[in-house]
Amino acid sequence: MTLDLGAVSRQIRTMTVELRDTESEFQARVARAREILNRWAERHHELRNLVTDYASTLRGAAALAALPTERLNVRYAAPTPPTDVTVLASDSSTIPPDRHTGALYYLINVGSTALHYGSAPGAVLDSRPTLYYRETDLFIQGEEPVPVQGSRLEAKSILSEVEELVNLAQATPSDQPAVALLDFPLILWILEENKRFVQRHFLEPFLEYLDIMRDRDVPIAGYVSRPGYAEVAGLLRVALCQEPERQCRACLRRGQDAPCDEIARVTDRDIFSTLEPGERTGLFMSRSEILKEYPAPIRFFYLKVGREVARVEVPAWVAQDRDLLDLVHAVVYDQAQKGTGYPYALSRAHEQAVVGYADRERFAELVKAALLRQGLEVRISEKSRSKLRRAI
């Protein structure tokens, strides 16, 4: 046996007891955050100025404080979706490069769906696997070759998904409203720690795809289930600060508890969990570092889809068009109801994209057989070989 379940079960019991004991304290922090939100609700312009004026001094959880664009506690009920509407969605799954196998490659399988509602109902489900193995696929050329793996492979997958959404949008009649959904934020946080030439490698085509969607008048939205962001909470931390002229540096220098620690560990979804089903918050602008490479900041709102609060991100051109914004709001909520809490179109796209264990095993065998047919030696590492042998 590789896992001592007895020892783990004891640790689990200890963990749950401690979580129970701290739950009431945490809920008090959430209540305090909501109190601050309501107190500053009409002063959102003042709070926004505080964030922008002292942005360089903000640290920790306040460093990514979002910028409000309207009253902080405003709520919008879900509009009724159009009778005739098309919902586009894509998702992907990968087989990452593995240096322990006989050849270096990776595979991206993009699943997609186009659901047509109304007078001409229908559905198109598809998947598109692509194998990448050439030098230009495996490495990004710049200051030095950078392998496509980890966050860069994830960015490559997202790019493939958005490309598929563009293809679907271009095949959709222009006289019918459509919404495109991505199971990933439009803010590519995963690129923040990469070098600038790597960021440009992915962002330039990504932003071009968003422009094509704008030209087609098809709003695109990034959907995040059970989000862990604390950007609105960071904004409320700034509101709690008693020394805005010195901000976070003063507290850190003194080494004492900061006033904003009253709402420590509170996330945005905790704050907005009192939304009614179908209601969304107002719009906020993120201050992520990667957005400096975007032509305009991505906007986001929180939406109660059922038992959870989801985050929905949209480009600036969608946020500035009330009809498009309402269309996104209506369609996302309607899809979540059809999918019992998660957008139905995204679920169907995921089913097309997923590469299960059996498929991965068969794929590996296909690669091995093809290499042998070409007279190529199939070399695997001793680590992989040892895993294939039964333990004694």
Image (cartoon, rainbow, N blue to C red):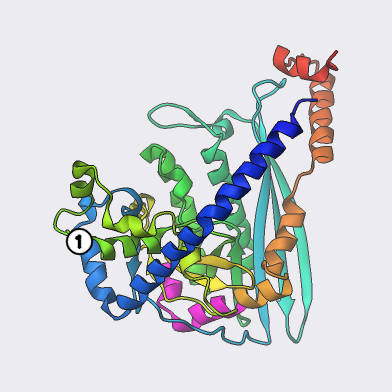
Q: Which residues are magenta?
A: 313-331
- The magenta stretch spans residue 308: no
Give me the residue at 74% from left, 29% from top: 4
Residue 317 among magenta residues: yes
Does residue 284 show up? yes
Residue 381 is at least partly visible in this image: no
Q: Is residue 211 left or right of residue 153?
A: left
Q: Is residue 367 above or below residue 211?
A: above
Q: Label 1: which residue?
A: 242
**Vertical side of 325 occupied by 155: above or below:** above
- Disc 1 is placed on an element classified as loop
Q: Please state the horizontal and vertical placement of residue 70, each as a whole percent of the image.
A: 34, 78
Most foreground residue, 256 or 345: 256
336 is higher (above) or lower (below) than 261: below
Q: Residue at x 57, y 28 (%)?
A: 135
Residue placed most toward the observer, 5 or 155: 5
Question: Residue at (45%, 49%) from the top-left corner?
Answer: 189
* Res 265 → quadrant: bottom left
Q: Compare residues 229 and 296 and report the one nearer the observer.
A: 229
Q: Main secondary structure of the magenta part?
A: helix
Q: Nearer the viewer, residue 333 or 111?
A: 333
In the displayed image of the protein, which residue is found farthest to the left? 245
